[in-house]
Image (cartoon, rainbow, N blue to C red):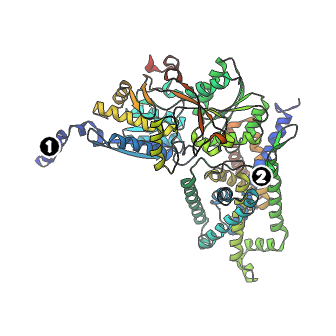
Amino acid sequence: MRRFLVPAGAALLAVAAHPALADFTGGKVRIGVLNDQSSLYADITGQGSVVAARMAVEDFGGKVKGVPIEVTFADHQNKPDVGSNIARQWYDTDGVDVIVDVPTSSVALAINEVTREKNKVFLVSGAATSDLTGSKCSPNTVHWTYDTWALANGTGSAIVQTGGDSWFFLTSDYAFGHALERDTEAVVLKAGGKVLGKVRHPLNNPDFSSFLLQAQASKAKIIGLANAGGDTINSIKQAAEFGIVAGGQNLAGLLVFITDVHGLGLQTAQGLILTESFYWDLNDSTRAWSKRFSERMNGRVPTMVHAGVYAAVTHYLKALDALGADGDGKAVVAKMKELPTDDPLFGKGTIRKDGRKLHPVYLFEVKKPAESKGPWDYYKLKATIPADKAFRPLAEGNCPLAQ
Amino acid sequence: MTELFGVPAPALFGQLLLGLINGAFYAILSLGLAVIFGLLNIINFTHGAQYMMGAFTAWMLLNWAGLGYWWALLLAPLLVGITGILIERLLLARLAGLDHLYGLLLTFGLALVIQGIFRNEFGSTGLPYAIPPELRGGQNLGFMFLPNYRAWVVVVSLAVCLATWLVIEKTRLGSYLRAATENPTLVQAMGIDVPKMVTLTYGFGVALAAFAGVLAAPIYQVSPLMGADLIIVVFAVVVIGGMGSILGSIVTGFGLGVIEGLTKVFWPQASSTVIFVIMAIVLLLRPAGLFGRAS
């Protein structure tokens, strides 16, 4: 008995001498970046998000209340079953306290449930579905960067207002595409426009000619692309080939990232209207941060998802610092909602009761090749949508937390 | 307007034609696989990566050496074909006579390594490659707008498929190839250098993949994953046609392209699955494939 008691007592003394260690599970803070490391969303999220999370930790000083912070990452392959297995392993055996990023809405919805069940923290940057702060909202989740409602409200309204009142949707056939189509359709109908048809294509589909032909036959003025990444790139590229724009119809890329514009080239992408909550060339502090990011990422600039990961992790660490513990996920998220947010990328903001992070959202137009002054100089700002107008009103989301 | 199965007839013709165009890629890729399987008895899982290398070589020739599409169409298959020859000499030749599984694991592993290297170097979004100026624009056929480039793809793929079939079925060289497939020892005894023939055949199959890659570059994004996405479908095409059957791979390549195209009209969500459903049915009814000989 004594042989056991002595070391146990010594361990207790060590913990008592280091009060913070007792409140942080496993004696450290572990951040798990879970995203697409190898497929169509890998440039939008991927290693860039890992680098962004590491930068946030370094800028915070590497420690919270003397407790070390670690960043780990994994590839969910855009499959909900793979993603939830990794999340369970991380939470149950690897001591991960928070999961960050998680593009692909179907995977994000699965992680949302696992995180709620285990009472950990989920910081969403890559996923788009507005259900994460709507009917599926959770006291353990913060949705940071953007969502389908904000995209529809930005790009959708801008296009309807300039006369694009009849739509045909090309929709990626999973949770994200469905949500984006639903939210955009609502905007179009509300503004008095109509939807002439829609076609749902499998995720990661190489050839869009058949779908584009159907869109062409519908005679809709606007072909709304409710897809992302490689699917959007191929849709736009092949629409040019089939003379869709030359024939008088216009494309609306509802979710276009700067890496997609880079992949398309300005020649093909010029004139596209798009909605983002971050652009590297917005102001001095975004430029300074993006420069540091680029140096670590082979010259690539950050996407809004990368920026969101940095800002969300920074705010999470601030909440841990204020709370002095990381074990109770609900308490951490409550603290995050209580503290105002302030970071160099999104400026000052707040997190709403339903988990929605509020900040301005920008409407950009892709520059013509002649207007671009250097590598990655792709956007010109058309409008700024203020934080209180950019996201779905709290009452319309049907989130139980909001009542 | 006349309608067939609830779809306007002109729209249906358009979809048939598009299916044929996509089938052209399946045909040319599965042809390369069939040639390699027929002679080497190796299931070449690197094929998709080699198709991707063809597209990337076209991009590199344009951006680093200033050589356009037409040069790429000639040089890319040659360059990638040479890498194929090296792979056969250095690696695959050592597996001759072993179980299929070894060749499969080696080529699959190689595919992952090659894709990983390209992804690391170029990112996963891919790179733009423009349609050559001579083939821009398109024709209005009344029932659809046919881009000139797609018409070119069908014509050139048909020509390449036909030429390959003629060489293998109708020439002396082809007869050596077929004989070596049946009984390599006997053919070697006749004074024909079988190992060299095997190496060149692998190189040729790989060159076909790279050729398809160059054809695909202006249509799809030049991306490290373009082959990985396509290769599984192409394997299904080969299995449906009958492993190693040249004619089978050409006919099923075009045929399945058309079926997939029609699925995109009637039930778009199933378009990525329909080929595998057909594969399952064919395997149940004719395990050797539509054109394969039961052994």
- Picture mark count: 2
Question: For the residue marked with disc 1, what is the amino acid?
Answer: Gly
Taking depth in this image into account, of B59 and B281 the one nearest to the observer is B59
- Tell me the number on the disc at residue B163: none
The x, y position of residue A131, in whole percent, is 52, 27
Taking depth in this image into account, of B74 and B42 the one nearest to the observer is B74
The x, y position of residue A31, in whole percent, is 38, 41
The structure residue drawn at horizontal position 45% and vertical position 38%, both measured from the top left corner, is: A309
> On the image, which quarter does residue A201 sit in?
top right
Look at mark 2 in the image and give the residue it sits on.
Answer: B24
Lateral position of residue B227 relative to residue A301, left or right:
right
Spatial separation of the CA atoms under disc 2 and disc 1: 75 Å
- Provide the secondary structure element on which disc 2 rests: helix
Label 1, residues with CA under 10 Å away: few <14, some 14-19, many ≥20 = few
Give the vertical position of B203 relative to B190 (above or below): above
- Provide the secondary structure element on which disc 1 rests: helix
Taking depth in this image into account, of A198 and A311 the one nearest to the observer is A311
State yes or no: discs 2 and 1 in contact (Cβ < 8 Å): no
Look at mark 1 in the image and give the residue it sits on.
Answer: A9
